[in-house]
Image (tube, grey):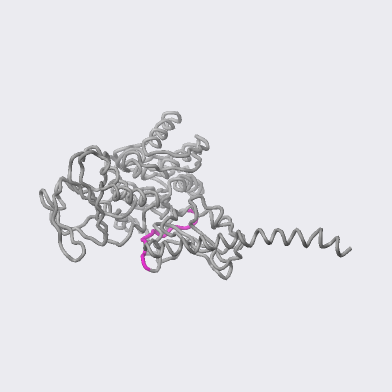
Amino acid sequence: MQIEVIFAYVLPLMFIWAVYLPARKRLEVRAVAKLAASTEAGLLEPASLHPIIDRAKCIGCASCVRICHEGDILGLIDGKSELVEPSRCIGHGACKAVCPADAISLVFGTARRGVDIPNVYPNFETNVPGIFIAGELGGMGLVRNAIEQGRQAIDSVRRVNGIDVPGVLDVVIVGCGPSGFSASLAALQHKLRFVTLEQDTLGGTVAQFPRGKLVMTAPFTLPLAGTFNFSELSKEELIAFFEGIVEKTGLEINVGERVETVTREGNHFEVKSTRTTYKTRAVLLTIGRRGTPRKLDVPGENQPKVVYRMIDPEQYRGQHVLVVGGGDSALEAACEIADQPGTTVTLSHRSESFSRAKLKNRERVKQAQEAGRLNVMFSSSVKCIGVDEVEVKWNGEVRSFSNDAVIVCVGGILPTPFLESMGIQVETKYGTR
């Protein structure tokens, strides 16, 4: 009987254990190596929402490691999950959803770098009853998640008291990027009385991305349209896709109409735009965080040759171009321009590494450097922009070189004054939710 038990249970368990332990050891060795590489390269600052792991709760099951679609962002070290490539985390939160021990929290910012975030409740409502925020403005930069938040925010708007009041709109949606577009379709689906205001064009911030930029690599669902599984989708393809849905559904979007003020009047809000004033029971802000570009504040920055986004790299053919910044937009712009014939491109970044850029973009920059098509200046700062030259401080000395164009990609300024004028509280997050 004992021999039968050994053959039936003990030996299979020993075999499984013999296979499992080496595999787990390899997983840990790989995680330790990735964390060491991230530390050495200074790539320890997540760009957006990211997980922190409570090691006391973590049971080391590696569910979070396996679920992440972005690769080895998480790994096992000493039997516990750890964020080993923080700079590559894009904040989709799948790790938290799959954790059986509730050991993962999603937070904004770190102890070293704070992130300004409006106070928003789980139902997307701000501290001002009736005003909601969805998408990038609330800290969620991933396009797919922004689309989902727009839909969910409308579900919350539908529960606001006073919907269906005669002469008053149910909701004014401000902004028509991915989140605002999804929200508009949801409002149309549920037959709400609404208007969507977009100061630029359909696509919002996405429409301002560089030509050919990939913006979607995962399935997403849009109200009235269905679920779509694009392996890769460029900016142009996404906007064309949106335009097709607009034509199919009859969705109306007031493009070129900017909101100036939002004020409460009794039980409703008055939204004053550049065209008219709307009365509404609720307001949904989906305006993103990049409406006002952050400037360098250096002499000569007001010249026409200084711009804050790169639309078409071909216009810089044969020119001396300085790109300033260390995020994905800066790296993509520098590489796209460096591919143009006859260009001389310099990429200036104030930090020692591209800690906030995707791995693919960092590798692309490295390849352009090695090919001699791109000059990178880490730990540098622009001091002055002249008519045909620029001055950059690098390695302790100011260097001057020829310049025809400057592209500044150092992020946007949160529209704090606009939010505060409505009474919305803004908090700087240092590794908190």
- Magenta residues (range): 112-123
Position in image of residue 51 (x %, y %): 49, 61
Residue 116 in magenta? yes
Which residue in the rendered view is the most extreme toward the right? 1
How many dots with numbers?
0
Residue 144 in magenta? no
Whether 60 is drawn above or below 198: the answer is below
At x 81% / y 62%, what residue is drawn? 6
Left or right of residue 288: residue 228:
right
Q: Between residue 308 and residue 365, name the one nearer to us.
A: 365
Which residue in the rendered view is the most extreme toward the top? 248
Q: Main secondary structure of the magenta part?
A: loop
Task: Indicate the quadrant where residue 234 lies.
Answer: top left
Task: Indicate the quadrant where residue 273 lies.
Answer: top left
Position in image of residue 340 (x %, y %): 25, 39
Task: Indicate the quadrant where residue 44 lies.
Answer: bottom left
Position in image of residue 385 (x %, y %): 14, 53
Whether 253 is drawn above or below 285: the answer is above
Q: Between residue 80 and residue 194, name the one nearer to us.
A: 80
Which residue in the rendered view is the most extreme toward the bottom? 56
Left or right of residue 417: residue 242:
right
At x 26% / y 48%, what residue is drawn? 372
> Could you tell me which quadrant the N terminus lies in?
bottom right
Position in image of residue 332 (x %, y %): 32, 46
Left or right of residue 376: residue 137:
right
Q: Between residue 159 and residue 425, name the one nearer to us.
A: 425
Q: Between residue 255 and residue 74, name the one nearer to us.
A: 74
